[in-house]
Image (cartoon, helix red, strand yellow):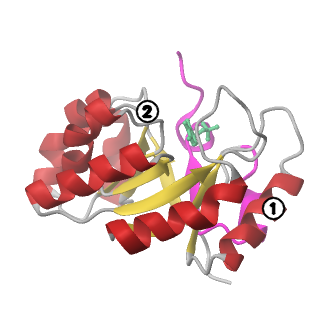
Amino acid sequence: MNPAQIICVSKTFALSKLLPLIDYGHRHFGENKVQEAEAKWSEIKKNKKDIKLHMVGRLQTNKVKKAVKIFDFIHSVDSKKLADSLKKREIEINKKLSYFIQINLGNEVQKGGINKNEAKSFLDYCNGKLDINVIGLMAIPPFDENPEKYFNDISSLNSKLGLKHLSLGMSNDYNLASKYGSTFVRIGSAILGERKS
Ligand SMILES: *Cc1c(COP(=O)(O)O)cnc(C)c1O
């Protein structure tokens, strides 16, 4: 089994705190707000073109324009409206991103993501009709519950759909996530320390 790629989720942390990681050679970083990502990463990405930026938070369609410009991966595709808008913007600026479809495993109203029963038809829409590059599923299991059942669910759905990548696991559960075939773990506090906000 290949080890998962670590995305260092750097939301709320200043670039100065991240420079040692970049100098050391780490290249995958995650943010959850378009504006913060733009302010933090625009300049350095011009000089270090191999830095890959991942949008891990919920994305509103009115932020798509800026998001497609700054990000390389978007982990939170969860509606046709959003997918349509991403495609339109890709064409406008002639850039291809990689995407994850976010699945709402616990059917939690406050969280983004589509129902797992709709995953197949939504994937067909994105990779077929729309022709954007969806590479896998992403999920955040319900807080305060044992994630194992959810990891098992999404991992088997991911294989059933024939997807190569899986965005699963955060600071508290990345070990377990990698046992369930995660290829991108999203780790913030375990690398950078507690966030203030
Ligand atoms: C903040 C965040 C993370 C990282 O969380 P940690 O618990 O600090 O590792 C991972 N995924 C998403 C979607 C996040 O918003």
Residue 13, placed above or below residue 25: above
**In this rendering, position of residue 120 left or right of residue 27:** right
Q: Which residue is mark 2?
A: 11
Residue 181, placed above or below residue 102: below
Name which quarter of the figure residue 112 lies in.
top right
**In this rendering, position of residue 181 left or right of residue 11:** right
**Residue 181: % across, % down:** 70, 72
**What span is in magenta?**
172-197
Q: Which residue is mark 1?
A: 153
- Judge by depth and name the residue closer to the eye, 167 or 128: 128
Q: Quadrant of ligand 1?
A: top right
Q: Amino acid at mark 2?
A: Lys
Q: Amino acid at mark 1?
A: Asp
Residue at (39%, 59%) from the top-left corner? 26
**In this rendering, position of residue 42 left or right of residue 26:** left
Q: Is 151 colored magenta in this rendering?
A: no
> In the rendered image, is residue 163 in sight?
yes
